[in-house]
Image (cartoon, helix red, strand yellow):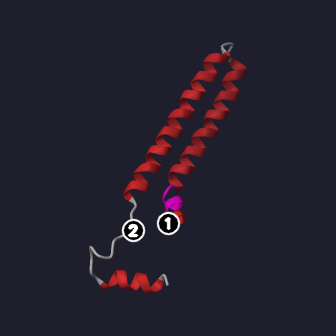
Amino acid sequence: MFWEGFIRSLQAEITTAIICLVFIGIAYAVLKRVTDDENFVKLGAKILVAIVLFFFLGGALVKGATNRTPRQDVDKSGVYEQMKENTK
């Protein structure tokens, strides 16, 4: 697997997850000061973080499973030969 390409393909998911986690952190800080029930706020924040991480990891697994390097033996076109020569 080419890790650089895999990480680049996850760029949108990484950005979305970071933005969601920042907003959850801000909402947690605001709600912690406003409400008296701190345990409820902590539970809500933990659930939201778990949901964000679940969907991020799910997207990463789907991309990891479906992003495969094209096999040369399936297609005999000259494109794969050119790619092979360019990577040497």
Q: Which residue is mark 2?
A: 69
Q: Are marks 1 and 2 in contact (CB under 8 Å)?
A: yes
**Looking at the picture, how far across and down is residue 27, in whole percent?**
64, 30
Q: Tell me the residue at 44%/86% (across/down).
A: 85
- Which element carries disc 1, helix, strand or loop? loop
In the depicted structure, whether residue 12 falls above or below residue 54: below
How many badges with numbers are in the image?
A: 2
Q: Tell me the residue at 63%/23% (across/down).
A: 42
Three-letter amino acid code at the position of disc 2: Thr
Q: State which region is magenta.
A: 5-10
Q: Tell me the residue at 52%/38% (across/down).
A: 52
Three-letter amino acid code at the position of disc 1: Phe
Within 10 Å of the Cα at label 1, are there few (<14), some (14-19), or many (20+) other Cα atoms? few
Classify residue 21 by image quadrant.
Answer: top right
In the depicted structure, whether residue 65 falls above or below residue 80: above
Residue 39 vs residue 2, the one in the foreground = 2
In the depicted structure, whether residue 85 falls above or below residue 63: below
- Which element carries disc 2, helix, strand or loop? loop
10 left or right of 28?
A: left
Q: Tell me the residue at 66%/28% (across/down).
A: 28
Classify residue 34 by image quadrant.
Answer: top right
In the depicted structure, whether residue 23 falls above or below residue 71: above
Q: Residue furthest right?
A: 33
Q: Which residue is mark 1?
A: 2
Within 10 Å of the Cα at label 2, are there few (<14), some (14-19), or many (20+) other Cα atoms? few
